[in-house]
Amino acid sequence: MDLYDEYRVKPDGKVQLKVIEPREDKPFKDREEAEQLTAENVEAIRQLQYRMFVEGKQSLLIVLQAPDAAGKDGLIRRVLGKMNPQGCRVHSFKKPTELELAHDFLWRVHPCVPARGQVSIFNRSHYEDVLIVRVHDLVPKSVWKERYDLINSFESLLASAGTRILKFYLHISPEEQLERFKERLDLPEKHWKLNAADYHERDRWDDYREAYQAAFEKCSPKHAPWFVIPADRKWYRNAVVSQIVRKTLEEMDPQLPPVTEDLAEIRRLYGMAEGED
Amino acid sequence: MDLYDEYRVKPDGKVQLKVIEPREDKPFKDREEAEQLTAENVEAIRQLQYRMFVEGKQSLLIVLQAPDAAGKDGLIRRVLGKMNPQGCRVHSFKKPTELELAHDFLWRVHPCVPARGQVSIFNRSHYEDVLIVRVHDLVPKSVWKERYDLINSFESLLASAGTRILKFYLHISPEEQLERFKERLDLPEKHWKLNAADYHERDRWDDYREAYQAAFEKCSPKHAPWFVIPADRKWYRNAVVSQIVRKTLEEMDPQLPPVTEDLAEIRRLYGMAEGED
């Protein structure tokens, strides 16, 4: 089962989140098998990232969007954040500041895209400007309607500079979300995360679903695909995302640069006869 | 043995790098004991970092300086980079660009200092401007001489905003450095790191020692101390640095913020009777 193709939103495809099962377990025999795959993938990703870093030609942008408590932080902690931080940065986009609002909606994200050799992880992103902004009417429809094309142009610009883009939506059921909210009540060290506003956002679940679907359908070209990841089970989410990231890096196939220095000269400097080592 | 005090450069203290043993193993019984301590420290650091992140009041700046091959990258990979990347960024300062050189020497580092709740790791830093710059006469003496005071003022500014500063010098012997250079010849995937210029920098070892000593003696106030870490043994370096970072975070003693939300109201929203959970 090719997980990359299984969960990718095809260009111009239709998306019905309602019919996608959030509590998936196939193709894994059990949790243990999935966790084993995740561990192997994390190690492979680290090695591929090292090659990409040294190669210095390509870059990777990972976008995460999800309802509250769907597991973005956990995914970063357990999988994506295991990359070497010398070549990987997480950028969290929160409520825009006044200065940010005084610019176009891509102004604050552009400086955060990855340089050649680097990985950027967006914890929330420019997609908020067609999600929460759309659901809560923060700008007129005439404004947010244009943003899908603007996003596509922006992502094409990045792609043309050697950036691969992967966009993950963590697909959680409202029942599982409520369970996770409740768990926070049992953990005093998570109490700071509690707030009534997150609960009230649940009333807009259907509106968000529509907004997500529109974004996935309009903005999933081959070079910057969306993936809808069943996320009710954390181990499943980790296995699938790590598999997709690994496959992408393998396709990018970063190469160590050719040696430009004169190795014989360096050997001589080090006081080593040719072939002695 | 208090490793923090053992390796800290005392304010107005003298530093003689020549008499500090780079191949240290005390107080550890053996490598295994040191690695066990490192593992415990890494886990403790992660937990403390989480609290600091949530608290959002204090921050930590870690500065790394060292000769080539002394192990900055390894220290980041094995110890410092194990922190959660949502709250930790590595900034590598290389040869300055034209734009950077067109500004004061602190201009490029200032945007990279940690925000409240965050950790920044500087892989090389503003100290290059009193190290390589001094050794290679890149600016007149009258210019670099003033920089020690300017650095102290800058670091005081950061401290006044709640930033703790730890500065580590990885103290490696020239013999160990040459060994590590030679090892790179045996590892094709490290060949990209080889270059004759690094070898020739070894001729300036004594000049660098003087420049390092001057920086340590002039810029090690209590709120922003330098530590000289014996680094010929990687496991020793990892144990000592992790211990110092852990102790510092414990002293900072970050606290989870008080709960401002009405938990009873949230319980009601979740459909849970008081005390039911």
Image (cartoon, coloured by chain):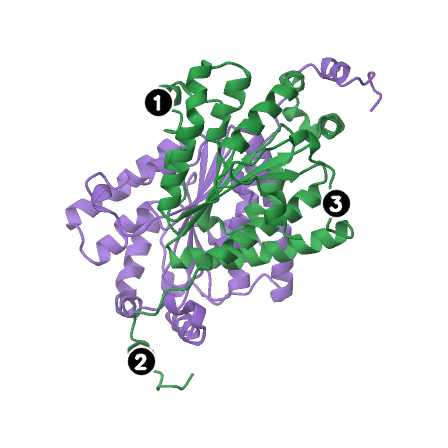
Chain colours: A green, B purple
Q: CA distance from mark 1 to mark 2?
A: 55 Å
Q: The numbered mark 3 sits on a residue in which chain?
A: A
Q: Earlier in the sequence, mark 1 or mark 2?
A: 1
**Which residue is denoted by mark 3 in the rendering?**
A25
Q: Estimate the x, y position of residue A95 in percent, counting from the top left.
A: 49, 22
Badge 2 element: helix
Asked if badge 3 and badge 2 are on a common chain, one would say yes
**Which residue is denoted by mark 1 in the rendering?**
A103
Q: The numbered mark 1 sits on a residue in which chain?
A: A
B48 is higher (above) or lower (below) than A141: below
Q: Earlier in the sequence, mark 3 or mark 2?
A: 3
Say which of B17 and B181 sits in front: B181
Q: Amino acid at mark 1?
A: His
Q: Earlier in the sequence, mark 1 or mark 3?
A: 3
Q: Residue at x 34, y 70 (%)?
A: A259
Labelled disc at residue A264: 2
Rate crowding at label 2 as few (under 14), some (14 to 19) or many (20 or more) other CA atoms within 10 Å.
few
Tell me which corner region of the image, top left, top right, bottom left or bottom right, holds residue B131. Answer: bottom left
B164 is higher (above) or lower (below) than A38: above
Badge 3 element: loop
Q: Estimate the x, y position of residue A61 in percent, counting from the top left.
A: 46, 43
Residue B89 left/right relative to A247: left
Q: CA distance from mark 1 to mark 3?
A: 43 Å
Rate crowding at label 3 as few (under 14), some (14 to 19) or many (20 or more) other CA atoms within 10 Å.
some
Quadrant where the C terminus of chain A is found in the figure: bottom left
Residue B207 left/right relative to A57: left
Query: Can you tell which of label 1 and label 2 is closer to the viewer?
Result: 1
Q: Amino acid at mark 3?
A: Asp
Q: CA distance from mark 3 to mark 2?
A: 55 Å
